[in-house]
Amino acid sequence: QLIIEERLEGDEASVIAITDGRSILTLPAAQDHKPALDGDSGPKTGGMGAYSPTPLVDDKLLAVVQEQVLVPTVHALKRQRRPFQGALYAGLMVTPQGPKVLEFNVRFGDPECQPLLMRLQSDVVDVLEATVDGRLDELPELQWDPRPSVCVVMASEGYPGPYERGRPIRGLDEAANIEDVKVFHAGTATTDGQVVTNGGRVLGVTALGDSIAKAKLQAYKAVKCIRWEGAWCRKDISDKARNSGTD
Ligand code: GLY
């Protein structure tokens, strides 16, 4: 038996905060693309691409999420004597009635992490060490590249269903040489010095740009350099932002 309590209409966004159990650093919002195919169709995946920041969550809404979702959650855990230290990921539906929590994860989010790290200019190791040591409040303000970032996930043939591993990947150096691009490895391995596929979501090809549209172009330019048998990706990562008319 299934009870539907409330149907939420809106767009999904991810807001991740780093907390040492007392203080909170809320990171810029990101938007994932969970369905496998363009136009948000097809089966659900772990995420086929992401971009940040997202016009879906402006500064005002980010402050609401921090005050109404993240701070109360961190404080409730502390009151229960189970303080949480790490990355607290709020998966939200942004509805006309405001943000509603769909899920919490305790990780940076994949592929949300890639565009976030691409924009973070402060040293992430300093941030993580301060988190572990409980001294986030002593950390200088995080520095961000103001430019948006787009990550396109390249996947194995068959994903999110069964897929083969061990397919040689070509063009990684060529892609890495493109300005403002970084290729994050997810499902890869090295066999006899050759990088091969070793998972469903194989690479997170990530780029910065002066606008979301330019970051998208740059990311897909890098995607075009990379090839293996059966490689595929969505072609519309970040279009949701542009469709909202703000980019
Ligand atoms: N991209 C969604 C997650 O990491 O859960």
Image (cartoon, grey):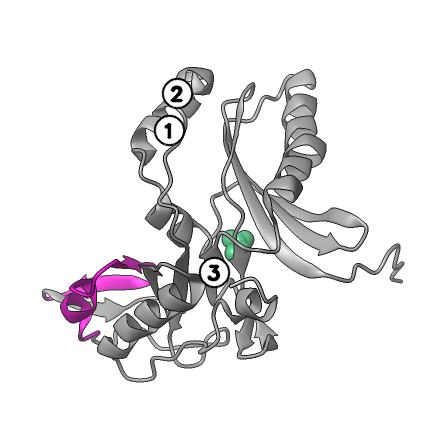
Nearer mark to the viewer, of 2 and 1: 2
Q: Secondary structure at mark 2?
A: loop
- Distance of mark 2 from mark 3, alpha carbons? 27 Å
| Magenta-tinted stretch | 169-192
The extreme bottom residue here reads 229
Residue 127: image tag: 1
What residue is shown with label 2? 139
Q: Secondary structure at mark 1?
A: helix
In this view, the residue in front, 199 or 94, is 94
| Residue in view at x 49 percent, y 67 percent | 238
Residues marked 3 and 1 touching at CB (< 8 Å): no
Give the x, y percent position of residue 1: 89, 62
> Would you say residue 201 is visible in this rendering?
no
| Residue in view at x 49 percent, y 43 percent | 107
Q: Earlier along the polypeptide chain: callout 2 or callout 1? A: 1
Give the x, y percent position of residue 64: 69, 37
In this view, the residue in front, 138 or 166, is 138
